[in-house]
Amino acid sequence: MNSPLRGKRILITGGAGFLGRVVCERVQGLGAAEVLVPRKSQFDLTHELDVARMYEQWRPNIVMHLAAEVGGIGANRANPGRYFYANMAMALHLIDGARQYGVEKFVQTGTVCAYPKFSPVPMCESDLWNGYPEETNAPYGVAKKAALVMLEAYQQQYGLKSAFVLPVNLYGPHDNFNLDTSHVIPALIRKCIEAQSASRDHIVCWGTGTASREFLFVDDAADGLVRAAEVMDVPEPINLGTGSEITIKHLVERIACLCDFKGDIRWDGSKPDGQPRRCLDTQRAENRLGWRAKVDLKDGLRRTIDWYRANPS
């Protein structure tokens, strides 16, 4: 069967990035007429005039908004104002531009950071508004959640078709391995490989290791996002995850083993753990999209480690 994306001009913000490159491959494989990837040197998506100029020049049929300014706990603590402004401004200008220029559908990526700090686990989409997000990443999470409200309002008033997906923490090849801005898996992989190569006797990890997280391989996330673009017309939030969690302590031990690092793991309790638990209820994704994750954590970690060894920072 032909995909609804076949023959469409599809604009993918963040299309040159970690998740975006896989999404681009997927929509090209489905027969998109053209895949348009804006670069910051061409269009600063936080600026309204740049967004208007992009829409005027490219006239896309479908917009998939993946671009974000985000990082791990440390980066979120250092840049709360910037992360709120950049993510809110991009969504604001892109969604309104989609209305003005007759875009057929707008697909927005949300974030698990939007969930309340003490949301029941597994986190269900119906709990999204039942509390304030964990403080260290709240500005980013609230900006993303505001985009959901905007899409709901724009569908109600203007008939703009849209989709809204909430991926859990992503990882995989081509991730950001910069220790100042990376998320937990790439940061740990880099720490372990560099320590192993330098014959160091220990690594230091943030927090206590008791917090738990769920992780989704980038290829699975891309498949879920593309499927939402194909079948969803309303911005009903849809979780994308595996439905299973692991403590940071056990994650570090698993990564250390896969990286052949045999030294000690020391914990810096003066640093925050972040949200206590993260694990998503993924039943809606299965029901609405016919999607479920395929890559298990061990296989995904091994593939990510192999890629980083071949492409060290």
Image (cartoon, grey):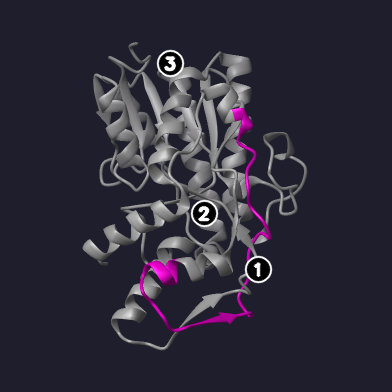
Q: Along the horizontal axis of the image, is 179 left or right of 313? A: right
Q: Quadrant of residue 128?
A: top right
Question: Crowding near pointer 1: few (<14 within 10 Å), some, many (20+)?
Answer: some
Tell me the distance, in whole angstroms, between the alpha carbons under discs 2 and 1.
Answer: 27 Å
Q: In which quarter of the image is residue 192?
A: bottom left
Whole-percent x, y for residue 70 in the image: 47, 54
Q: Does the magenta stretch include residue 52?
A: no
* Magenta stretch, residue numbers: 255-284
- Residue type, label 3: Glu
Q: Which quadrant, please, contains the N terminus?
A: top left
- Between disc 2 and disc 1, whose residue precedes? 2
Give the residue at mark 2: 83
State the residue lying farthest toward the left: 310
Whole-percent x, y for residue 10 in the image: 32, 25
- Between disc 3 and disc 2, whose residue precedes? 2
- Residue type, label 1: Thr
Tell me the distance, in whole angstroms, between the alpha carbons under discs 3 and 2.
Answer: 28 Å
User: Residue 210: which disc?
Assistant: 1
Whole-percent x, y for residue 263 in the image: 43, 84
Residue at point 68% right, 60% down? 276
Of badges 2 and 1, nearer the viewer stands 1
| Visible residue check, residue 180 | no
Of badges 1 and 3, nearer the viewer stands 1
Give the residue at mark 3: 104
- Between disc 1 and disc 3, whose residue precedes? 3
Q: Along the horizontal axis of the image, is 120 left or right of 139? A: right
